[in-house]
């Protein structure tokens, strides 16, 4: 990939990242942090790629450790975020039932 | 699968992550947003198994399946077996530290990926690749060890107060200089040893960086380390020529930075002060004295009588409510008071508990109607007309020292001004000070009544006493 393309992607992603969360109530700070945390678990993709490239036992061992850690980050992150947000759901249905 | 299709799937996952963050910013769409993010991540992960990324210098990758395929599957299974139960079983009170831990292992994974790719490339690596590798290793290791320390602080495996030792700032500055020096060494000399030295120094720096942070600043640091991990993922995306990793990592880095700033603002902290606390912090005059001063403690009946004749009551929940799992009992009490015609509101401090929004999540679990939850700016002007403020397991967020005592660790943090209410009831387990370790003068105020004991047990007693009246 050429440098200009990478810089373009990077700069645009920075602005998108700034824009999407610029106004968020403090209630959602923790779930949003947790969700963003799960998203960077996609480093799992990178860990799988380096495991494929691994030629020595050392490289393979380290990349498998990376896969384990990344899977914990990604899957655990999405599950725990969902649990946080699940708490909001029954309240809505109760509100609706009450109306 | 050809490389075009693979890249398009990566782009689709990137879009899914944008939609996920967007969704997570609004209460109504938050859950859907998270599911979109999970979907994007799953599709991206599956796509790696169908397309072999060429190694450095190769035009096309080898044929499928991936090398070490079963090892990879096994490692993913191990990760699932550890991660899923941890996320499903964790108590609501321990959620913040779990997020910190997940963030740390993500940073560790990014650092390991960079190290392996570096070992693999050897002398073939371009200078730019080495620079990005160094960045990933340094920041990933800082994120890893820093997150472990925040985990230990929140789990109370170590002191929650700022840890400051004499000459600490010189040690930290020295470590930082060493990290930068070794970074240059890696870039110029190339080699495994310098990289490992760099990793160890970075781990050490992460520990030293987080140790002086205490109390309400811990969540801000977790958010910052989260943004750090995002940037390391973006940098490793450069080394691996993965557009997806660059997009996902940059998104998290940018949104995480904004989120860190928002959290700092919500707590009235300067981001700079939090980050460089290590360089400015002096050993705090934290009151350790267990001086015997008179407090007015009451019984559940006394509290019930006070509530029965109140017109307006504000409930201020804190970490103690979460620990005691008393959210359902507190709702029972609120409903009972409402049925007696008492005006009831919950005063929610942005950082009550251990994380912003912690109390909202907890009370939502007990189906507390959203319109009874009042944010700090809404509720503060009303304390003057409030007959009783019930503080349940909260301390620092109502401590007037934040407004009156310059130099105390929470000075400048906005508080819930319960001191303006006509009567204050504290439900506490003991006289132990709060997370920040500062004495609360309000406990000795003549209009304060203390009800000692577990929050849930105390509330249950108050409910039955109030029913009997």
Image: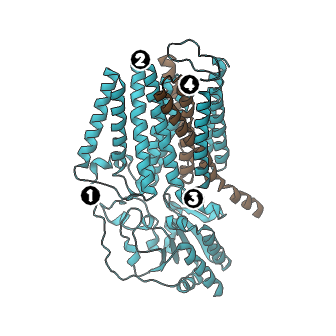
Chain colours: A brown, B cyan
Residue B360 versus residue B68: which sits nearer the camera?
A: B68
Residue that label 4 marks = A52
In 3D space, how far apart are the residues under numbered discs 3 and 2 (Cα atoms)? 47 Å
The correct choice, above or below, for A98 with respect to B298 in the image is above
Residue B3 versus residue B346: which sits nearer the camera?
A: B3
> Mark 2 and mark 4 in contact (Cβ < 8 Å)?
no
Q: Quadrant of residue B159?
A: bottom left
Labels 4 and 1 in the same subunit: no
Judged by depth in the image, the label closer to the viewer, 3 or 4, is: 4
Residue that label 2 marks = B126
Q: Residue furthest front?
A: A57
| Circle 3 chain | B
Labels 3 and 4 in the same subunit: no
Q: How dense is the environment of label 3, judged by Cα within 10 Å: few (below 14), some, or many (20 and up)?
A: some
Labels 3 and 2 in the same subunit: yes
In 3D space, how far apart are the residues under numbered discs 3 and 1 (Cα atoms)? 33 Å
In 3D space, how far apart are the residues under numbered discs 3 and 4 (Cα atoms)? 38 Å
Residue B254 versus residue B202: which sits nearer the camera?
A: B202
């Amino acid at each position: 990939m050429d440098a200009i393309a990478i810089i373009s992607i990077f700069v645009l992603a920075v602005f998108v990242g700034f824009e999407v969360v610029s106004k968020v109530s403090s209630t959602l700070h923790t779930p949003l942090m947790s969700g963003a945390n799960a998203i960077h678990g996609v480093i799992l993709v990178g860990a799988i790629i380096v495991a494929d490239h691994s030629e020595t036992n050392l490289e393979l061992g380290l990349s498998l450790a990376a896969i384990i850690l990344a899977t914990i980050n990604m899957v655990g992150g999405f599950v725990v975020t969902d649990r946080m947000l699940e708490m909001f759901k029954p309240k809505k249905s109760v509100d609706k039932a009450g109306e | 699968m050809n490389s075009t299709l693979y890249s398009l799937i990566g782009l689709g996952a990137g879009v899914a992550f944008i939609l996920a963050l967007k969704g997570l910013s609004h209460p109504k769409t938050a859950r859907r947003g998270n599911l979109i993010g999970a979907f994007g991540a799953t599709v991206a992960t599956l796509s790696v198994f169908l397309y072999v990324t060429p190694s450095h210098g190769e035009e096309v990758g080898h044929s499928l399946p991936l090398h070490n395929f079963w090892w990879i599957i096994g490692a993913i299974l191990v990760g699932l077996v550890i991660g899923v139960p941890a996320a499903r079983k964790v108590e609501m009170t321990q959620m913040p530290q779990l997020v910190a831990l997940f963030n740390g292992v993500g940073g560790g994974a990014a650092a390991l990926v960079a190290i392996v790719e570096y070992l693999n490339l050897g002398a073939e690596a371009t200078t730019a690749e080495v620079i990005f590798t160094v960045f990933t290793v340094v920041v990933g290791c800082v994120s890893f060890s820093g997150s472990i320390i925040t985990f230990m602080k929140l789990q109370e495996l170590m002191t929650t107060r700022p840890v400051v030792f004499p000459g600490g700032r010189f040690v930290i500055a020295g470590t930082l200089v060493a990290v930068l020096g070794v970074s240059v060494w890696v870039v110029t000399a190339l080699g495994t040893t310098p990289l490992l030295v760099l990793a160890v120094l970075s781990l050490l720096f992460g520990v030293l960086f987080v140790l002086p942070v205490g109390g309400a600043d811990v969540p801000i640091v977790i958010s910052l380390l989260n943004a750090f991990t995002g940037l390391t993922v973006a940098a490793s995306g450069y080394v691996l020529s993965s557009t997806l990793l660059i997009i996902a990592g940059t998104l998290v880095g940018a949104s995480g930075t904004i989120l860190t700033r928002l959290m700092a603002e919500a707590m009235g902290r300067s981001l700079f002060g939090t980050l460089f606390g290590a360089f400015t912090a002096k050993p705090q005059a934290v009151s350790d004295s267990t001086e015997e001063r008179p407090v007015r403690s009451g019984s559940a009946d006394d509290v019930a009588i006070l509530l029965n004749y109140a017109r307006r009551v504000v409930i201020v929940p804190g970490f103690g409510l979460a620990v005691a799992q008393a959210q359902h009992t507190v709702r029972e009490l609120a409903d009972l008071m409402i049925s007696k015609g008492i005006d009831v509101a919950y005063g929610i401090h942005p950082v009550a508990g251990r994380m912003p929004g912690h109390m909202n999540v907890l009370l939502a679990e007990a189906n507390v109607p959203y319109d009874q939850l009042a944010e700090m700016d809404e509720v503060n002007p009303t304390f003057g007309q409030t007959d009783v403020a019930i503080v349940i397991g909260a301390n620092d967020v109502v401590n007037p020292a934040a407004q009156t005592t310059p130099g105390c660790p929470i000075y400048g943090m906005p508080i819930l001004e319960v001191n303006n209410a006509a009567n204050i009831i504290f439900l506490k387990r003991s006289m132990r000070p709060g997370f920040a370790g500062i004495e609360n003068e309000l406990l000795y105020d003549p209009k304060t009544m203390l009800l000692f004991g577990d929050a849930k047990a105390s509330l249950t007693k108050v409910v039955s006493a109030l029913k009997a009246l």
